Each structure stands twice: as structure tokens, then as C-alpha cells.
Image (cartoon, rainbow, N blue to C red):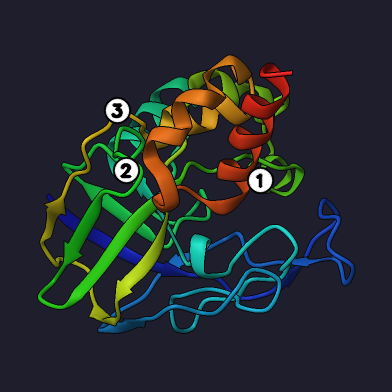
Amino acid sequence: MKLLSVNVGRPQPVPYTDQAEGVTAIDKRPVEGPVRVAAPGPKGVGASGVAGDTVCELRHHGGDEQAVYAFAREDLDDWERELGRSLANGCFGENLTTEGLDVSGALIGERWRIGSVVVLEVTSGRIPCRTFQGHLGERGWVKRFTRKGATGAYLRVIEPGEIRAGDPIEIVHRPDHEVTAAMQFRAVTTERELLPQLLAAGEALHSEALAAARKYVAGQAR
């Protein structure tokens, strides 16, 4: 398991975003050399946890629980075959493009060491948005991405430090439950009956998903 690339984005004006200034940094590109990773602060205030990366829409992106976004090269390759087009590392807006790691199948609370210092923890899957669809230029992309369910994973920073392309990735902790990033995604989108099962992940789960699960359970108990 290794890190193929570290990808960062710069703000660009586009016609397909709801961001107030009409800009997005979803088109991320691989960068050379070491890149610092650190917790950026709470959502709405903190942006990306990856140095040099920009988050333009702080209402929905960035913050400690979405500090870093990872996507597997294997899933990009699968989409290449399905879409009949080339997909470069970073084109799904991911900060980390990985190899040999089941990112969508990672457990909530699972921890990865990248290189010798940095430790990241899985918090949730990624929910597709209009900007993602506009960036890729694929008709019906949000529904298509949702149907496949290979979401990649958002991560929080447990131990900050520097990472670079080629660094090994080691799973250093796997929690004792079965809640994956992909399952969390299905629970908050198309299969809400799964929401109670998310509670097994506890506080490691993205706080918004945890709140949704608790609300659903409370509603069922009435």
C-alpha cells in the first residue's frame, strides 16, 4: 500500500458552482516534494489539512473532519474503463491518490500511517455535489457516482507532519465494528435504514453523520 500522489487545488472561476464568488479548487494536481499535513480547524473556519490546497466552499468542505480526502487509483481505473476516458490523479478532487488500499471499504475510525510520522483517521465517505458533476462534465454524474458507492474517504489528522508521493501506507488501527466509509455514505444517502448501524463507530464518525444517526434512532423510538 502506498501513496501515489499528493494533490492540491487552486481557485478557478467556473460556471457550475454555487460558491458565492463562483470559484472552485476541485481540480487538484499532483505536487512534487514533501507536503505538510495538519488539522485545519473546525468546519466553516478551517479549510484543507494539506498545505497549498484551497477550499473555496467552507460551508460543505474542509475542517478537521474533512481535512484530507483520499481516493483509490484502482477506483479511478474502474471509472476510466466505464467512462472511456483518462482520469488523472487528483481529478476527483482527492488530496491523496492511493494504491493497494481499499479506501471506500476502510472502517470509520481506521487509522493510516503515511510515511514515518503522519497518522490519519477515516471519518466518512464523500457525498457528490453539483460542482463535482460540472467539473467532470458527465451527465447524471451525481446519481451515477452515488449508485456505484465507491466514495473514497475523508480523514482527520491525528499526527501531523510531511508526506510525499511514494510514501508507504500502513493501517495501524482497525476498530472493532463493520461500519465502512461506503456504508456510511449509503446510510446518509440512499439507505437510511442503515443509520442506526452507524452508531457502532461512535465518536470516530463524522459528527454530522453521527447526529443524523442519533436523530433517526430517536425518531424510530417514538
Q: Residue furthest right?
A: 20
Query: Badge 1: how crowded within 10 Å, few (<14), some, or many (20+)?
Result: many
Name the side, left or right, on which 178 lies relative to 124.
left
In the rendered structure, find residue 72 and report the number of the disc placed on it. Answer: 2
Give yes or no for contact between labels 1 and 3 (Cβ–Cβ under 8 Å). Answer: no
Query: Which of pointers 2 and 3 lies earlier in the amino acid sequence?
Result: 2
Query: Which of pointers 2 and 1 lies earlier in the amino acid sequence?
Result: 2
Measured as percent of width and height from the top left, residue 107 is found at 30, 39
- List the residue tagged with mark 1: 132
Distance Cα–Cα, label 2 vs label 1: 17 Å
Measured as percent of width and height from the top left, residue 18 is found at 86, 55
Q: Residue at x 59, y 16 (%)?
A: 191
Q: Does the rendering let one see residue 20?
A: yes
In the rendered structure, find residue 41 and report the number of the disc placed on it. Answer: none
Dot 2: element: strand
Measured as percent of width and height from the top left, residue 62 is found at 59, 66
Distance Cα–Cα, label 2 vs label 3: 20 Å
Q: Residue furthest front?
A: 222
Q: Nearer the viewer, residue 25 or 61?
A: 61
- List the residue tagged with mark 3: 178
Q: Does the rendering let one see residue 145?
A: no
**In the depicted structure, whether residue 175 falls above or below residue 82:** below
Query: Badge 2: how crowded within 10 Å, few (<14), some, or many (20+)?
Result: many
Q: Nearer the viewer, residue 24 or 202?
A: 202
Dot 1: element: helix
